[in-house]
Image (spheres, grey):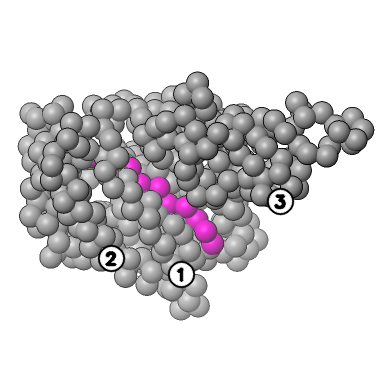
């Protein structure tokens, strides 16, 4: 069902009240047309989380990435300012940097055009005879970049509202986590064989926790719908109980100092469209993003943030490895399920099942998503 009217007709069960609703049809997860719409509507318009400021701590530090196929270069210049550009030489479009590192300038490996850390063209050999060529008018195409509490965001659109307005709900709900006073401990990257939205749905699907994660953290987990706060812009905040993300449910590096008055079971979660999830626990904060790399493939990145002072501990690397390994264990449990879900989405035998009243966050997410991508109807929440 690639036609919009045909697609919209399949969303009526989803748009019912939660107690009457069914899940979304498979085309939402298995259609090239759906992915193209999502890239145009979400990823080319919204603010996107791309990492932590401390990943680019020194002048000359840079990192590269591809976001929905677009090459991106982020760097810190000599005056300490962070910059984001399209990683595409103004001559033929070749990437001028790869991976991450530290440099004084970016040099295109094809014809040698050279750019400074702000992306401005500084040298183009043998171009003197090209009539009207003006180096000052050539540069790596700039992208908007801004930061929030130590986190870096970029935006491909000049029309999107400023980042701090965009994140106003996040600021209101999660400023107390003080991510600006944290430092990156682990950065985990995982390739998954499923549609990117299934990962986010799984992260907000607490219905499955006591079943799938019974042997890992399910016994320490509790929540109810009163702790789910739905936002008009499609974001949501969830307040619940769960132990620290360690094998024994203990904060191996202690409580975050600003959460000393909270119980060990404190937990919160936020989702901000299109693909930014934030987990807060008593001992750490875990931002997470999921990038679509195809209809049925995506790349997930999880960042473990801890208070800066814990990095002075002699056992810090040992403790960080425990957090990392446990995260991979839990993700491994989820991975089997969401990759199985993806196979169902493209099966001719798939019929969306009824929702449980415990799937309030997914109901909200999917209805806002469908309304924005297909432009018709709103859920009854």
- x and y percentages locating residue 19 in the rendered image: 30, 54
Q: Distance between the residues labelled 2 and 3?
A: 41 Å
Which image quarter holds the N terminus?
bottom right
Picture quadrant of residue 202: bottom left
Q: Is the magenta stretch mostly helix, strand or loop?
A: strand
**Disc 2 target residue:** 332
Identify which residue is drawn at 18% across, 62% down.
213
Secondary structure of the residue carrying numbered label 1: helix
Q: Is residue 305 left or right of residue 271?
A: left
Nearest-to-viewer mark from 2 and 3: 3
Which is nearer the eye, 161 or 72? 72
In the displayed structure, 189 sits above or below 267; it is below
Binning the other alpha carbons within 10 Å of mark 1 as few (below 14), some (14 to 19) or many (20 upward) gives many
Q: In this view, does 19 lie to the left or right of 89?
A: left
Residues in magenta?
285-294
Q: In this view, does 8 lie to the left or right of 169?
A: right
- x and y percentages locating residue 191 in the rendered image: 42, 62
Q: Which of marks 1 and 2 is nearer the N terminus?
A: 2
**Disc 1 target residue:** 345
**Disc 3 target residue:** 110
Q: How many labels does the image show?
A: 3
Disc number for residue 178: none
């Amino acid at each position: 069902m690639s036609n919009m009217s045909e697609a919209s007709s399949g969303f009526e069960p989803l748009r019912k009240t939660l107690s009457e609703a069914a899940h979304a049809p498979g085309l939402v997860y298995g259609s090239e047309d759906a992915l193209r719409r999502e890239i145009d509507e979400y990823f080319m318009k919204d603010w996107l989380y791309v990492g932590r400021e401390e990943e680019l701590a020194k002048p000359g530090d840079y990192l590269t990435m591809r976001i929905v196929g677009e090459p991106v270069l982020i760097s810190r210049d000599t005056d300490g300012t962070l910059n984001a550009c399209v990683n595409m030489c103004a001559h033929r479009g070749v990437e001028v940097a790869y991976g991450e590192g530290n440099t004084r300038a970016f040099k295109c490996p094809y014809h040698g055009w050279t750019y400074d850390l702000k992306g401005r063209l500084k040298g183009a050999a043998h171009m003197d005879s090209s009539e009207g060529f003006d180096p000052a008018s050539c540069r790596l195409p700039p992208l908007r970049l801004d930061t929030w509490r130590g986190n870096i965001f970029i935006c491909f659109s000049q029309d999107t509202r400023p980042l701090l307005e965009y994140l106003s709900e996040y600021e209101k709900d999660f400023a107390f986590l003080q991510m600006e006073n944290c430092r990156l401990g682990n950065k985990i990257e995982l390739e998954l064989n499923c549609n990117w939205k299934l990962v986010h749905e799984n992260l907000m699907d607490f219905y499955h926790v006591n079943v799938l994660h019974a042997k890992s953290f399910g016994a320490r987990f509790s929540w109810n719908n009163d702790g789910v706060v739905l936002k008009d812009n499609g974001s949501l905040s969830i307040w619940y109980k769960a132990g620290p993300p360690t094998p024994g449910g203990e904060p191996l590096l202690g409580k975050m100092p600003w959460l000393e008055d909270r119980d060990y079971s404190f937990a919160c979660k936020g989702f901000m469209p299109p693909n930014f999830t934030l987990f807060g626990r008593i001992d750490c904060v875990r931002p997470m993003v999921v990038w679509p790399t195809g209809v049925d493939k995506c790349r997930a990145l999880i960042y473990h943030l801890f208070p800066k002072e814990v990095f002075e501990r002699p056992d810090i690397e040992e403790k960080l490895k425990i957090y990392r390994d446990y995260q991979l264990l839990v993700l491994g449990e989820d991975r089997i399920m969401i990759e199985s879900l993806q196979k169902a989405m493209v099966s001719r035998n798939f019929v969306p099942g009824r929702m449980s009243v415990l799937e309030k966050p997914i109901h909200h997410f999917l209805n806002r998503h469908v309304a924005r991508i297909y432009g018709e109807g709103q859920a009854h929440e």
